[in-house]
């Protein structure tokens, strides 16, 4: 469809979005038209099938375990009694790495941070009554809630080889003989559940469309890195979800298509943010802007010369500057030397950005920080994440970017489940911080239309994914060790209903299991598996622990990890599997995971 | 479930080959170096110790490159290292760009318009007659001025302030230090002292500027803490032993210093548990490769470990029989900062996979462990770096090397452990412990005699000249074929860095783009 | 030959354009020399040909060797695909960010004021107070200073000081060297700095010591408002080509005037509302003056993207 073929409401929506961006940036008509054309023309602005934006949280240096607090694996909580005020049930005990089951000594009292962090709770005593929306109010002593109606339950189809575990399954599911836990196929969703903590974001305000999809896959490796091991949509080719999504998102006009924040490093082998993104593995993907922190994010769009009296204050001159700077770079003798390419590519992007002065629109204010529920700089890592999220929300609202990948914390939190926690933040404190930040972030996005698809709220058109180097075991708080049951990684995705909600693969507590290891080549505690690409049922890990390091295990985890990232792309494209398969070449997974109509 | 802390039985496919190629670091630490032996016997106050976890976290360590045998194949790449003739019609030769980048690196600024015009005129004339009409002559002359300066009244070359500043900043960047650091003094919980982080770069810069043998960086025995005034761009003598109320110095007598190795600023900047960060930085900054840095001729399969270090297997402390750390809680209690006694016997289990790096580390780090957080040597040569044992007591030598376990029959507060230290395997061991000032200089001499350190200086110089990234952090590698001739030149000219610099910047390769 | 022609046509298109510029993005260099006759690979020894650098095609075995020895397949594969084998790439100049200190000296030597109260602010350490460097308008009052700084352009010395961390001031306290590569943020701020310095350079006619020739400053613009070769050469630090001078001159001709502006400065009240403290009138700048400033900024930005 050509530009001129766009008609009616779709065209109006498209133009409204583009004009809104232009107005925010003080553009004249020439630059606005150029902006539209650079986006790929009108045809791509088809609001009937909008492409989602993407925010990726990268848990650096072992910090990928934090999402376990907000989105705990539910299958340890499958219970015959379902007493949500108890710290133990048929299967779960306080050894499960959930803050809401902990005593003070286990990091269960977050109120030490109450002066700077809203909504902190002391789980050592009966947690107090609290109001709620979709989740209903919280009674005194209530530690968590079962949230029913999700699409997939990880351990369906499973027959536990461990006798004690099997006994619990029989009790909970009413099984007999060797019958497995009923399959996901045809299962009644009202019997599927996830666990909501008081701090679990989004469910309370927005309901099941913001429920999480959790997919196990990808590997963990021995050393922590400031990046991720599970962000590849094709790990063999080192094609990353960020580069692939950015390519897909090129239909969304933006100033800086991708921003990578926080000195991210490459997935398997180090390197810098360039390697994390791996643009070279996907020719045609847009160049990312790489910045170390929130302030530098603002600096991307904050030029002195674009202020009153500056030579770029007239947008027409900013265009001229960009064009001629690029022209002069191109005229230099070194322009075609491969060793200069990286620097000049960055320079050309900078030539565009320098015409912008949006600092006032992007800088976090005290009011923002209060709204995000984390004030002051008591813990620099929390303050920095807060500011990154605030600036990201503002940049998304202004249409400055289609994707942000931000690292966070980088603190290898082995001691989180101790009273003092890590860096002054324990499990309950961390849960409150993350819950506040993610809720406020979503509230921000839901308060504004998508600048390019104004018929949609921004929050309803933004996928959020959590990746990292290791998700840590959720099954034992002791030293909060790294190894998961099968050495598998985990991705949490908020897809805006494009993916089936619930958990795919994972692990759960086995009664009496005393495994405590931080050896990355040992199996972690519990029992678990990956997931069936057609049914979503559990594909168990071999009981001998070999899956952790065996070649078969490594390959299977890679495949599942690739599929998890392909699922992110499926969410970004709203079910366009053909587009996903431009980057993903593994086994079809959509039958199990994708909820959106396949196109 | 019983613990398996071993690796080789589950080595990733192909990892044996990688080990053989010097890639131990990809897997060795990866195997969970020194992980906890959960369920081990409860800690006792005395006797054989209890192995504990030592977790490498969030590291950015890169594997060793071990590029020494890399072969340069000149045919077909058009870039022969022996290129000699300069032809101003060669379109790859660009004296203008070369002068610009040389001026930025050596002079800290763009060339002046006067110099540019002089260069342009020579290029236009295009002669080959060693006059102002000869572009090679003019370019070399300008670079010579940048590096060596101009002659004074006595005919002696005097370097420019700009060059001196550039060298100071160059070495600050290579050593990643500058300014002042304030930290806890000795074992005190409250006594804060300061140390300059500029004297080590100043020493290196001064050696460079004054054309002194650069191996003095490791062996100079006195006057090793000069200062640099960035305004006047002048150096002033300074002793690392000098002390004031707030700056305690390094407590190493003049005459027994070892260049930057005993520089209190360097030691303070890289303080860490066991002093491993110090020894690691010495390896990375001055030998230009990450750990593991030593390799046997052939790796060996020892039990479940693929072992590539030349050090004897089990030469460092680990949790196998005969190799465990032993503690003497009565005569040699484990004290932490503030004098608190740590009543446990935990020690790090440097398993077989750990030993690929720690075979080297544990034979180096203790020497530098006697310096505290501000780089002040313990008067009794007690280790002032902390152990990772519970309570963070100051380390004891047997935590590195079981051979240094205390003799229960003859408890001595700081017994000499003979020959415990060396720069590399096979070199004479340097004693650790005892009341005398450790022989830091002997260690420095071992480094100075190692061609790796000379080559490393050339690599760092090369990467700076050619605007390349860091050789260790970003793997901006310089193969031997590229750097060997320069290294040889550097050595043959008594490690004169300015001469090597001049050769590098005037090389036919440098002027090509 | 065809590529050269296309590049030439690209320059012509730009030179002859009337403002529809943003899509011009040439990626090839200019050369006034005729293309050399390829003479094949060199066999070592002395370099006697004028042949362009013949990069040897990658032999897969080379890649494997490098791969194995470096142990970083991702990085090395990128290097191999982008810049050739290690032997070749190690010998090539590369593009690093201009060092922070160098940048300050560069500005001074071209004629930019980097003084506070008559004293040079260089070198700028991490603890520097940049407030004495803001312009008189914003310095006049403390209550609306933040609003003023966010809305009214400041001199280059303030930008240099205020953005020192983004521009690359080394963080030795974190045991980090100065970053070698250019990030998007540092690149953007670098160009911002040059754009902020341009008005001074135009007004001061390259009065810095580095641009003096026989005691006189290099001329930046000719009487007919075209760019002068000496001025562009001095800004770049290497001889300007005809193409570069032409491009520079076209910027001057194509710029539009910077209109006058009226800026309301605000303070935030205790209740969160804002009050206007004063209104600052910012003068218009003619198209010609704007063009000259833009030309200087573009020349500096392009030339110093790499050190």
Image (tube, rainbow, N blue to C red):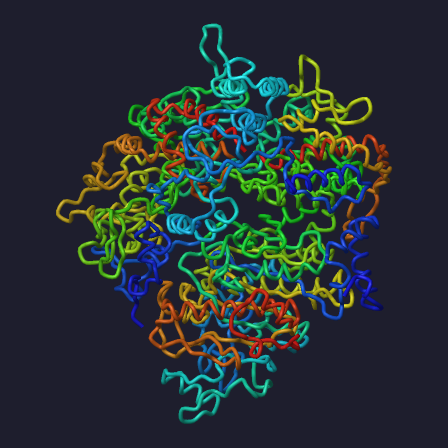
- Where residue A196 appears, x then y in whole percent? 58, 74
Q: Farthest residue toward the left? A: B409
- Where residue B438 appears, x then y in whole percent? 26, 33
Q: Farthest residue toward the top? A: B153
Image-based side of C161 in relation to B217, left or right: right
Where does the N terminus of chain B fall, quadrant-wise? bottom left
Q: Is residue B398 above or below residue A484?
A: above
- Where residue B64 appears, x then y in whole percent? 37, 46
Towards the viewer: A508 or B468? B468
Image-based side of B464 in relation to C194, left or right: left
Towards the viewer: C87 or A37? C87
Q: Is residue B170 above or below residue A90?
A: above
Can you see residue B232? no
Q: Residue at x 59, y 70 (%)?
A: A200
Which image quadrant is residue A522 in? bottom left
Q: Residue at x 67, y 52 (%)?
A: A256
- Where residue B286 appears, x then y in whole percent? 37, 36
């Amino acid at each position: 469809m050509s530009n001129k073929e766009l008609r009616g409401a779709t065209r109006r929506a498209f133009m409204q979005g583009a004009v809104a961006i232009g107005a925010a940036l003080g553009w004249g008509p020439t630059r606005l038209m150029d902006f539209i054309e650079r986006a790929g023309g009108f045809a791509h602005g088809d609001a009937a099938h909008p492409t989602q934006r993407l925010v990726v949280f990268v848990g650096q240096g072992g910090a990928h375990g934090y999402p376990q607090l907000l989105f705990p694996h539910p299958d340890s909580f499958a219970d015959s009694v379902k007493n949500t005020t108890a710290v133990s049930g048929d299967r779960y005990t306080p050894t499960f790495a959930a803050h809401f089951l902990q005593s003070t000594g286990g990091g269960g009292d977050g109120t030490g941070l109450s002066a700077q962090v809203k909504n902190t709770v002391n789980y050592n005593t009966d947690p107090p009554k609290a109001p709620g929306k979709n989740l209903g109010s919280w009674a005194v002593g209530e530690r968590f809630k079962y949230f029913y109606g999700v699409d997939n339950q990880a351990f369906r189809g499973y027959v536990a080889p461990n006798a004690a575990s099997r006994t619990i399954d029989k009790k909970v599911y009413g099984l007999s003989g060797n019958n497995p836990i009923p399959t996901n196929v045809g299962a009644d969703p009202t019997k599927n559940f996830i666990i909501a903590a008081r701090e679990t974001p989004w469910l309370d305000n927005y309901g099941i469309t913001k429920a999480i999809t959790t997919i196990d896959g990808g590997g963990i490796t021995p050393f922590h890195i400031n990046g991720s091991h599970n962000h590849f949509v094709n790990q063999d080719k080192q094609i990353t979800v960020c580069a692939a999504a950015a390519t897909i998102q090129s239909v969304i006009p933006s100033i800086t298509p991708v921003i990578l924040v926080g000195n991210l490093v490459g997935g398997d082998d180090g390197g810098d943010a360039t390697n994390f993104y791996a643009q070279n593995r996907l020719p045609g993907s847009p160049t990312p802007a790489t910045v170390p922190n929130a302030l530098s994010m603002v600096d991307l769009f904050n030029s002195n010369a674009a202020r009153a009296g500056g030579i770029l204050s007239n947008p027409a001159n900013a265009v001229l500057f960009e064009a001629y700077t690029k022209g002069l770079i191109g005229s230099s003798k070194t322009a075609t030397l491969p060793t200069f390419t990286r620097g000049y590519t960055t320079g050309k992007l900078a030539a565009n950005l320098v015409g912008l002065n949006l600092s006032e629109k992007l800088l976090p204010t005290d009011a923002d920080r209060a709204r995000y529920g984390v004030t002051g700089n008591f813990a620099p890592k929390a303050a920095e994440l807060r500011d990154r999220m605030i600036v990201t929300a503002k940049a998304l609202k202004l249409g400055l970017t289609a994707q942000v990948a931000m690292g966070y914390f980088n603190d290898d939190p082995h001691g989180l489940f101790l009273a003092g926690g890590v860096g002054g933040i324990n499990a309950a404190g961390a849960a409150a911080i993350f819950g506040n930040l993610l809720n406020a972030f979503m509230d921000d996005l839901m308060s504004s239309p998508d600048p390019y698809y104004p018929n949609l709220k921004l929050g309803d058109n933004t996928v959020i994914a959590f990746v990292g180097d290791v998700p840590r075991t959720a099954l034992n708080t002791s030293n909060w060790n790294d190894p998961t049951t099968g050495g598998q990684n985990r991705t949490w995705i908020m897809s805006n209903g494009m993916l089936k909600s619930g958990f795919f693969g994972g692990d759960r507590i086995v009664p009496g299991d005393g495994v405590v290891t931080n050896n990355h080549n040992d199996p972690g505690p519990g029992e678990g598996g990956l997931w069936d690409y057609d049914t979503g049922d559990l594909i168990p890990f071999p009981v001998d622990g070999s899956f952790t390091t065996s070649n078969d295990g490594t390959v299977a985890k890679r495949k599942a990890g690739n599929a998890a990232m392909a699922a992110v792309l499926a969410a970004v494209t709203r079910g366009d599997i053909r587009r996903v398969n431009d980057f993903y070449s593994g086994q079809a997974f959509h039958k199990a995971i994708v909820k959106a109509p396949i196109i | 479930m019983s613990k398996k802390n071993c690796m080789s039985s589950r080595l990733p496919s192909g990892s044996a080959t990688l080990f053989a190629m010097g890639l131990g670091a990809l897997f060795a630490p990866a195997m969970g170096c020194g992980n906890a032996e959960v369920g081990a016997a409860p800690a006792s106050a005395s006797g054989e110790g209890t192995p504990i976890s030592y977790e490498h976290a969030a590291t950015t360590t890169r594997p060793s490159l071990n590029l020494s045998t890399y072969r340069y194949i000149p045919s077909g790449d058009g870039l022969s290292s022996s290129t000699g003739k300069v032809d101003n019609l060669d379109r790859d030769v660009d004296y203008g760009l070369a002068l610009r980048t040389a001026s930025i690196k050596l002079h800290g600024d763009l060339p002046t318009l006067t110099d540019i015009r002089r260069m342009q005129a020579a290029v236009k004339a295009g002669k080959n007659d060693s006059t102002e009409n000869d572009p090679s002559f003019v370019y070399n002359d300008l670079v010579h001025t940048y590096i060596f300066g101009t002659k004074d009244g006595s005919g002696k070359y005097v370097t420019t302030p700009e060059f001196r500043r550039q060298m100071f900043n160059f070495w600050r960047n290579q050593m990643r230090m500058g300014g002042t650091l304030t930290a806890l003094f000795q074992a005190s919980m409250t006594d804060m002292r300061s140390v300059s982080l500029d004297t080590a770069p100043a020493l290196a810069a001064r050696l460079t500027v004054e054309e002194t043998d650069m191996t003095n960086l490791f062996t100079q025995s006195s006057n090793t803490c000069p200062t640099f005034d960035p305004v006047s761009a002048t150096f002033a003598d300074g002793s690392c032993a000098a002390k004031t109320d707030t700056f305690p110095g390094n407590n190493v007598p003049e005459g027994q210093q070892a260049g930057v190795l005993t520089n209190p600023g360097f030691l303070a900047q890289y303080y860490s548990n066991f002093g491993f960060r110090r020894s690691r930085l010495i390896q990375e900054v001055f030998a230009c490769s990450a750990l593991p840095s030593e390799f046997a001729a052939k790796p060996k399969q020892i039990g479940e470990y693929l072992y590539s270090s030349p050090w004897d297997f089990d030469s460092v402390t680990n949790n196998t029989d005969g190799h465990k750390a032993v503690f003497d809680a009565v005569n040699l209690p484990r004290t932490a900062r503030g004098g608190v006694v740590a009543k446990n016997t935990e020690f790090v289990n440097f398993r077989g996979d750990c030993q690929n790096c720690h075979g080297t580390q544990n034979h180096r780090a203790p020497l530098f462990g006697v310096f505290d957080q501000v780089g002040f040597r313990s008067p009794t040569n007690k280790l002032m770096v902390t152990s990772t044992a519970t309570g963070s007591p100051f380390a004891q030598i047997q935590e590195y090397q079981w051979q240094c376990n205390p003799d229960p029959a003859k408890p001595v507060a700081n017994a000499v452990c003979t020959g415990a230290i060396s720069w590399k395997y096979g070199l004479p061991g340097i004693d650790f412990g005892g009341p005398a000032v450790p022989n830091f200089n002997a260690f420095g001499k071992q480094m100075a005699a190692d061609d790796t350190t000379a080559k490393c200086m050339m690599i760092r110089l090369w990467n700076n000249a050619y605007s390349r990234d860091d050789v260790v952090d970003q793997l901006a590698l310089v193969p031997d074929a590229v750097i060997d001739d320069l290294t040889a030149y550097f050595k043959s000219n008594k490690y004169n860095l300015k001469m090597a610099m001049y050769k590098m910047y005037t090389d036919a390769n440098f002027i090509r783009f | 030959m065809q590529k050269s022609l296309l590049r030439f046509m690209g320059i012509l298109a730009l030179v002859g354009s009337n403002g529809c510029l943003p899509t011009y993005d040439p990626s090839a260099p200019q050369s006034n020399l005729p293309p050399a006759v390829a003479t094949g690979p060199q066999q070592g020894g002395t370099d006697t040909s004028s042949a362009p650098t013949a990069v040897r095609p990658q032999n897969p075995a080379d890649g494997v060797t490098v791969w194995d020895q470096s142990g970083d397949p991702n990085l090395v594969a990128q290097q191999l695909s982008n810049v050739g084998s290690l032997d070749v790439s190690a010998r090539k100049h590369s593009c690093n960010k201009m060092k922070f200190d160098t940048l300050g000296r560069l500005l001074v030597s071209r004629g930019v004021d980097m003084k506070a109260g008559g004293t040079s602010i260089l070198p700028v350490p991490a603890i520097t107070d940049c407030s004495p460097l803001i312009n008189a308008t914003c310095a006049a009052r403390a209550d609306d200073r933040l609003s003023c700084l966010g809305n009214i352009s400041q001199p280059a010395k303030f930008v240099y000081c205020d953005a020192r961390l983004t521009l690359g001031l080394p963080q030795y306290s974190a045991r980090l060297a100065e970053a070698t590569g250019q990030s998007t943020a540092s690149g953007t701020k670098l160009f911002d700095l040059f754009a902020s310095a341009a008005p001074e350079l135009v007004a001061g006619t390259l009065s810095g010591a580095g641009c003096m020739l026989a005691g006189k400053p290099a001329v930046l613009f000719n009487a007919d408002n075209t760019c002068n070769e000496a001025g562009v050469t001095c800004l770049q630090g290497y001889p300007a080509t005809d193409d570069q001078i032409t491009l520079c001159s076209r910027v001057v001709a194509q710029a539009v005037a910077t209109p006058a502006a009226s800026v309301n400065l605000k303070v935030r009240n205790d209740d969160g509302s804002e009050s206007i403290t004063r209104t600052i009138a910012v003068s218009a700048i003619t198209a010609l003056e704007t063009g000259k400033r833009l030309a200087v900024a573009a020349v500096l930005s392009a030339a110093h993207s790499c050190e």
